[in-house]
Amino acid sequence: MSTLAAPKSLRHAGAPGPAPAPTGPGRPAPTGLATEALVMAGVLGVAFVALFFRWFYSQVLNSWDKPADWGHAFVVPVISGYLIWQRRDQLTGLRPRTF
């Protein structure tokens, strides 16, 4: 008996079921986001804004009061969003990994 085989009590008689999903580095990337992932992203986003709200607020005041130095601050998120939108197909194909 192989060390990877299921015990006799867990084996089914008859035709085998569907092949298990591949695991490891060769497995295909998921195609859609699960609801849990979207909820977690929302919770983390709200937590991030809540933690850094005071810093964001001071940056808005600096941008508003000193446009010669900080006037571009309101345009940077718009340009960044446009660049991300342009490359969204490439970005969705990336697999998350650690450094």
Image: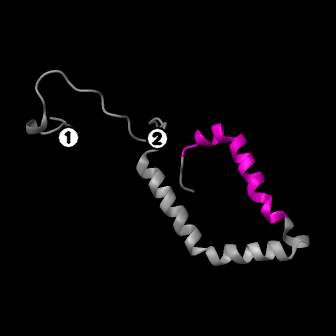
**Residue at x-position 80% and y-position 65%:** 73
The residue positioned 75% from the left and 72% from the top of the image is 60
Residue identified by numbered label 2: 25
Residue 4 picture location, percent across and down: 22, 39
Binning the other alpha carbons within 10 Å of mark 1 as few (below 14), some (14 to 19) or many (20 upward) gives few
Seen in the image, is 90 located left or right of residue 59?
A: left
Q: Identify the amino acid type marked 1.
A: Thr
Q: Which type of secondary structure does the marked residue at label 2 adopt?
A: loop
Which scheme is used to colour this image of the protein? one colour
Residue 20 horizontal/vertical position (percent) = 31, 33
- Residue 63 in the image: above or below residue 14: below
Tell me the CA gap for discs 2 and 1: 22 Å
Q: Which residue is mark 1?
A: 3
Say what secondary structure mark 1 lies in: loop
Query: Picture quarter containing residue 6?
Result: top left
Disc 2: CA contacts within 10 A as few (<14), some (14-19) or many (>=20): few
Q: Position of residue 46 (x, y in %)?
A: 53, 65
> Is 60 contained in the magenta span?
no
Q: Residue furthest top?
A: 15
Residue type at tag 2:
Pro
Front in this rendered view, residue 84 or 5: 84
Residue pictured at 78% horizontal, 52% vertical: 79
Magenta span covers which residues? 72-95
* Residue that lies at the very extreme toward the right in this rendered image: 68
Q: Quadrant of residue 75?
A: bottom right
In this image, 88 relative to 32: left or right?
Answer: right
**Would you say the magenta stretch is mainly helix, strand or loop?**
helix
Left or right: residue 85 versus residue 36 is right
Q: Assign the N terminus to one quadrant of the image.
A: top left
